[in-house]
Amino acid sequence: MTQMTYAEAIRDGMRMEMRRDPRVVLYGEDVGMFGGCFGVTAGLLDEFGPERVFDTPISETAIVGSAVGAAAVGLRPIAEIMFVDFMGVCMDEILNQAAKMRYMFGGKARLPMVVRTPCGAGQSAAAQHSQSLEAWFTHIPGLKVVMPSTPADAKGLIEAAIRDDNPVIYIEHKQLLTLVGDVPEGEYVVPLGKADVKREGSDVTIVAWSWMVQKALAAAESLAKEGISAEVLDPRTLVPLDKEAILKSVGKTNKLVIVHEAVKTGGYGAEIAALVCEEGFDLLDAPIKRVTAPDTPIPFSPVLEEAYLPSEEKIIKAVHDLF
């Protein structure tokens, strides 16, 4: 193990895969000499050269469209979109090309491509640069969706995503980029579709992902001082979803709180709630609670943004409401 930030762990994972497989290429806006908008790709141009790490025009359509073509003919591209908010520009390439091609060619075509993109609020970047839009991509059959919450998971999941033969949307939260944690050295793969219990508990299950895992852990620590034992479960990948892990945890605690930063209506938390109601309703001793952002654009004002975001206090209140 070695100590790394979340950003360094993503970079290390990409480095391991680029060393292992010469078909892996990395490109996007400012990923080369500048090292990426948030510094995640720093140094990779120096190691792998401009044929494998290069900057693109400011065109999300071209970035993702070319990744679809590159993947279809044998490369394993990592395409970076600077903010998840910009994914709407290239949604046709994601929705109608990357997600459909393998199916429409009867399984004969493979699309081993990763689209990396930062998400989330907390930096006063306002309504066009702060969204959590993961639910968009979970609604598209043919895509896998990854949202790591720790440096170790960030490395292990980027390596798994690059090795996968299907298109993967890899969403990294801006607020986590400086988070430091233990990360395995060398090649390290975390299988897609395997949840992780970040904290064991017996009284209530809190399902959260990405930055909200850290807030859920803080809430669980505070709840423990009150004598409430909260289990924090991180799906790590939303597609494929580890349904068995969620149902097992709810079967142990009989109560469920779901926490996500995205707005409430149509958020992925509703899918998890529906799963538990459909396949584990008898496990519940109380209604399911969701802690989310409100259905409004994200404010620029730091004070309003803080009020907008799910918080440790809001999670604790939701848990209290179940008892």
Image (tube, helix red, strand yellow):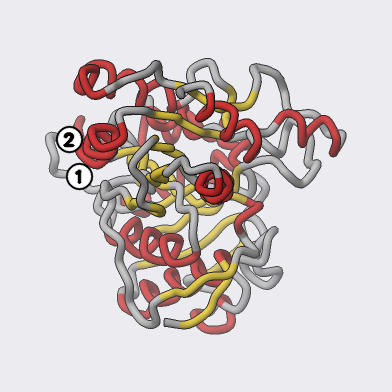
Quadrant of the image containing the N terminus: bottom left
Label 2 neighbour load within 10 Å: few <14, some 14-19, many 20+: few
Counting from the top left corner in percent of width and height, residue 304 is at 82, 30
Give the left or right position of residue 58, taking residue 193 as reference: right
Give the left or right position of residue 6, taking residue 95 as reference: right
Q: Give the residue displayed 45% in from the left and 58% down from the top.
A: 78
Name the residue beneath numbered marker 2: 105
Q: Give the residue displayed 36% in from the left and 46% down from the top.
A: 201
Name the secondary structure under disc 2. loop
Q: Nearer the viewer, residue 98 or 193?
A: 193
Looking at the rendering, which quadrant does residue 317 occupy? top right
Q: Is residue 186 above or below residue 305?
A: below
Q: Give the residue displayed 57% in from the left and 34% down from the top.
A: 315
- Residue 156 visible in this rendered orientation of the protein: yes
Labels 1 & 2 near each other (Cβ < 8 A): yes
Name the residue beneath numbered marker 1: 109
Give the left or right position of residue 41, taking residue 69 as reference: right
Q: Nearer the viewer, residue 133 or 285?
A: 285
Name the secondary structure under disc 1. loop
Q: Is residue 229 above or below residue 113?
A: above
Mark 1 to mark 2 CA distance (whole Å): 6 Å
